[in-house]
């Protein structure tokens, strides 16, 4: 996938993503990546009323309101933009236009009930700027503010809808050195507080100390059907996340994961997915002295589900470059396609993103 | 007595006329290296040419010839069939060493954010040579870079151009004879930093007033020195008329102006000895700065970041000002809201345009080729016809020009420094990787040869060390 090929992939997506008022749309001669890790094939795609009706090697005889000749360009499901504040952050340093974090509440409580979806603005310029590059959805992030549990979000579809949310609710917990230092003064103190908080979930005590009744209800509900996205880079922190999640029966996702390769056997055994920035290769902090470029390949080979994020919101469109570098450093190409398209939806509980009959046209 | 006066006068003249010794000079000297012949490579020369299936010979630290020529006995031969050669990449905007990895507070040495005008500070005095970012950038083909102070201040201080070689001190990395840079900053950052302390500047008009006040002081300082130097010169001329007594008296009454580090830097920029690197996002502000440069008679060498540079591409070219830009950053603050991915290609477009891809990032500096590839692609999508041999100049020759080192490096031409990258394929592919990186003819990086790669003491015994 050199840069030119990436461009063609993009063009293909634009074709797919163009809002069409036609009832039926036929895309011919596409080099179709269906969204799994299968190699691409030359196929035609028939779409009717937003549903993929047929995918076959020759549908050219089919009548359609609109026909687009892809002329061999790649066609993929719309891509995942990573974990972002798209629609939550209009301009990074215009703070009144940034709605992804919780700060200065002057309480010691943890607030898993803080829901960034209430502030989502589909009319933000970030949404179309990202979409036009071929990205169809993102995981909305509650940015780490000054709290250990920074809040909750979920997948959002970049179709301009005010409530285009889907999938499981994800709550963000930061267990890195930075938050340990902020909260309790150390990692050890931080884990103690988290243990206390989650311990309170199991006791019927109205006299809560670290969490409000709403927060408690939120965590109890999410333990059943939500996801806990732990930001952790250091290998030892990742092992703590695995143990904590096992103890409290949480569906965990690791976000960061710079040193996940060191403990990849344990991560693989737990079935925990890992969201990484495949460009991380510097010891940017003492949490990530083991950051390396082939992290994605090592995790994949160990049987771990790897996803990508760039850490960017305005430039989330950079994620294709992140994926390209992961491939340049050992991740199989077709796997990267799956990681960029259908896999994030699967992990975060969204609707399936596949180019196959019966699937909705998602963008 | 008269003889004594003559001696005294001569002594005074010689003391006065002696230039200040260079402070903190470069101590870099390339070690001796084996001559290398690269056979059958695709060469992007950096100055606009593409040479297919061409040989390149480097020896004694220099590019000896491209095409055909004589070989020293015992030259190493590299079969470069199917591989590409470019000049060593140059980043004009890096904070490696001054904001190193790991990014701990004790290493945060890039902004002397205690006053809006700190032209007296030199970024080189903050450079931590052990920053692992240097070796990562080397693995990305970067052979030289300018380390700049940050943009908190209107005048942030002097930048330094380094060769990307390992050294105990930054002086062992200093690019020989490269001019210093002067980092200046427009817009949001200075007014936010100082306005936030209810201190000037708190507005853009405050920014401009403060630049102009500083330039006025620098002009006066320069005039004082000019006057003094003229008096010394006149005295020297008079001494030939053997009127020693009056010369001595003239010199004694003309004490040299008191040196001022801040004004040394600003006067150096006015004289053109120090190149001005101006952090500026908005087109209107860049035009204001160009007018200010006319008012004080100095040149803006390069606008950095210039997210709106495409709006004034013609003016930049007409004023011979480079734009050092990102491929796709936008929206992180309101002065970056008008960013477009065609910016670099559009600044490159006019005759005389000088587009540069810069990083300002310890990640981006490792992948300047990918950043340039994105910019090239956007230009071509917009209907410009930008071939690789042109786009490569954005990260080689134009960058060297911006730093004032284009006579020495930045292109594959005989007689220039042998700063050369051998790539496994077209460097504008996301899969491209340097196979070898030479600096002054010395092989400093080779793929899958960690024993060759510089390892910082910080990484000794740690998880990754030289493995990356």
Image (cartoon, coloured by chain):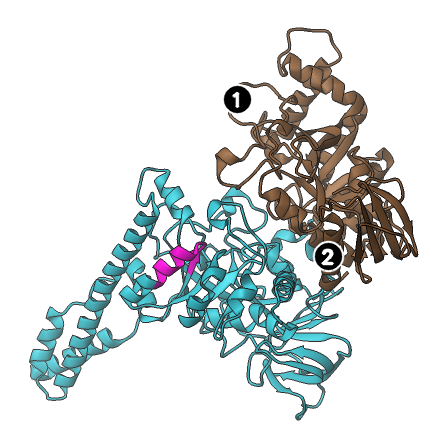
Chain colours: A brown, B cyan
Residue, disc 1: A105
- The location of residue B56, given as percent across then percent down, is 67, 84
The residue depicted at 31 percent of the width and 49 percent of the height is B205
Q: Is residue B57 left or right of residue A42?
A: left
* Residue lying at 81% horizontally and 62% vertically, measured from the top left: A71
SS class, disc 2: helix
Does residue B254 appear to the left or right of B428 in the view shown?
left
Q: Where is residue B355 in the image (x, y as percent from the top left)?
A: 52, 67
In this picture, residue B255 sits left or right of residue B151: left
Q: In this view, does B187 lie above or below A156?
A: below
Q: What stretch is highlighted in magenta?
A: B278-290
Residue A328 magenta-highlighted:
no
Q: How far apart are marks 2 and 1 (CA)?
A: 46 Å
Considering the whole magenta stretch, tell me its main secondary structure.
helix
- Dividing the picture into quarters, in which one does residue A332 lie? bottom right
> Tag 2, which chain?
A
Where residue A19 appears, x then y in whole percent?
Answer: 71, 46
Residue B460 location (% of width, % of height): 66, 53
Which of B299 and A12 lies nearest the eye of the viewer? A12
Where is mark 2, residue-wise? A11
Q: Do marks 2 and 1 share a subunit? A: yes
């Amino acid at each position: 996938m050199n840069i030119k090929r990436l461009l063609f992939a993009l063009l293909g997506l634009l074709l797919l993503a163009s809002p069409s008022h036609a009832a039926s749309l036929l895309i011919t001669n596409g080099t179709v990546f269906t969204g799994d890790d299968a190699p691409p094939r030359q196929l035609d795609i028939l779409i009717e009323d937003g549903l993929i009706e047929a995918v076959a090697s020759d549908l050219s005889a089919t009548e359609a309101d609109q026909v687009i000749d892809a002329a061999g360009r790649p066609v993929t499901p719309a891509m995942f933009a990573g974990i972002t504040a798209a629609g939550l952050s209009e301009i990074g340093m215009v703070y009144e236009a940034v709605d992804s974090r919780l700060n200065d509440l002057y309480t010691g409580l943890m607030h898993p009930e803080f829901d960034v979806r209430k502030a989502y603005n589909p009319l933000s310029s970030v949404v179309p700027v990202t979409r036009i590059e071929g990205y169809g959805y993102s995981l909305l992030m509650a940015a780490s503010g000054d709290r250990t549990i920074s809040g909750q979000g979920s997948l959002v579809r970049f179709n301009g809808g005010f409530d285009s949310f889907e999938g499981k609710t994800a709550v963000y917990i930061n267990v890195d050195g930075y938050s340990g230092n902020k909260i309790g003064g150390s990692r050890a103190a931080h884990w103690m507080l988290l243990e206390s908080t989650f311990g309170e979930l199991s006791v019927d005590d109205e006299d809560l100390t670290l969490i409000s009744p709403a927060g408690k209800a939120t965590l109890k509900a999410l333990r059943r059907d939500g996801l806990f996205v732990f930001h952790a880079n250091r290998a030892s922190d990742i092992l703590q996340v695995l143990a904590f999640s096992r103890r409290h029966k949480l569906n965990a996702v690791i976000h960061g994961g710079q040193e996940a390769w060191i403990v990849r056997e344990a991560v693989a055994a737990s079935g925990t997915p890992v969201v990484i920035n495949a460009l991380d290769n510097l010891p940017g902090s003492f949490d990530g002295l083991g950051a390396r470029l082939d992290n994605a390949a090592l995790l994949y080979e160990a049987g771990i589900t790897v996803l990508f994020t760039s850490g960017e919101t305005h430039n989330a469109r950079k994620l294709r470059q992140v994926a390209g570098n992961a491939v340049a450093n050992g991740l199989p190409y077709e796997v990267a396609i799956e990681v960029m398209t259908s896999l994030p939806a699967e992990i975060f509980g969204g609707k399936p993103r596949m180019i196959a009959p019966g699937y909705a046209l998602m963008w | 007595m008269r003889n004594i006066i003559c001696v005294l006068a001569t002594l005074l003249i010689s003391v006065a006329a002696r230039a200040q010794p260079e402070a903190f000079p470069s101590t870099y000297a390339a070690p001796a290296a084996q001559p290398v012949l690269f056979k059958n490579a695709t060469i992007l020369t950096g100055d606009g040419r593409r040479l297919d299936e061409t040989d390149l010979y480097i020896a004694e630290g220099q590019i000896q010839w491209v095409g055909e020529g004589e070989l020293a006995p015992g030259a190493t031969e590299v079969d470069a069939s199917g591989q590409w050669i470019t000049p060593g990449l140059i980043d004009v905007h890096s904070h490696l060493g001054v904001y190193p990895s790991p990014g701990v507070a004790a290493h945060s040495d890039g902004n002397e954010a205690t006053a809006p005008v700190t032209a007296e500070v030199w970024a080189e005095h903050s450079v931590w040579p052990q920053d692992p970012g240097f070796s990562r950038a080397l693995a990305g083909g970067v052979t030289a870079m300018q380390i700049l102070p940050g943009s908190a201040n209107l005048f942030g201080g002097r930048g330094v151009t380094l060769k990307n070689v390992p050294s105990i001190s930054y002086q062992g990395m200093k690019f020989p004879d490269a001019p210093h840079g002067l980092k200046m900053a427009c817009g949001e950052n200075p007014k936010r930093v100082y306005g936030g302390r209810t201190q000037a500047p708190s507005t853009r008009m405050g920014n401009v007033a403060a630049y102009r006040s500083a330039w006025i002081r620098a002009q006066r300082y320069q005039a004082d020195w000019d006057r003094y130097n003229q008096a010394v010169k006149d005295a020297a001329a008079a001494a030939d008329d053997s009127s020693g007594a009056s010369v001595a008296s003239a010199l004694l009454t003309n004490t040299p102006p008191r040196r001022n580090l801040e004004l040394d830097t600003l006067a150096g920029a006015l004289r053109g000895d120090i190149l001005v690197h101006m952090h500026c996002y908005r087109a209107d502000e860049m035009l204001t700065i160009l007018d200010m440069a006319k008012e004080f008679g100095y040149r803006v060498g390069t606008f950095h970041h210039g997210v709106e540079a495409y709006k004034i591409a013609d003016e930049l070219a007409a004023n011979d000002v480079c734009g050092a830009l990102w491929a796709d950053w936008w929206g992180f603050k309101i002065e970056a809201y008008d960013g477009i991915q065609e910016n670099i290609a559009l600044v490159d477009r006019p005759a005389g345009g000088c587009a540069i891809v810069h990083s300002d990032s310890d990640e981006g500096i490792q992948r300047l080729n990918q950043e340039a590839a994105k910019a090239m692609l956007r230009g071509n999508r917009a209907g410009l016809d930008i071939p690789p041999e042109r786009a490569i100049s954005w990260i080689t020759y134009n960058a060297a020009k911006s730093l004032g080192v284009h006579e020495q490096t930045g292109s594959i031409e005989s007689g220039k420094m042998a700063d050369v990258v051998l790539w496994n394929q077209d460097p504008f592919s996301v899969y491209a990787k340097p196979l070898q990186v030479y600096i002054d003819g010395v092989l400093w990086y080779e793929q899958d040869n960690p024993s060759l790669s510089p390892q910082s003491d910080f990484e000794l015994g740690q998880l990754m060390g030289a493995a990356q």
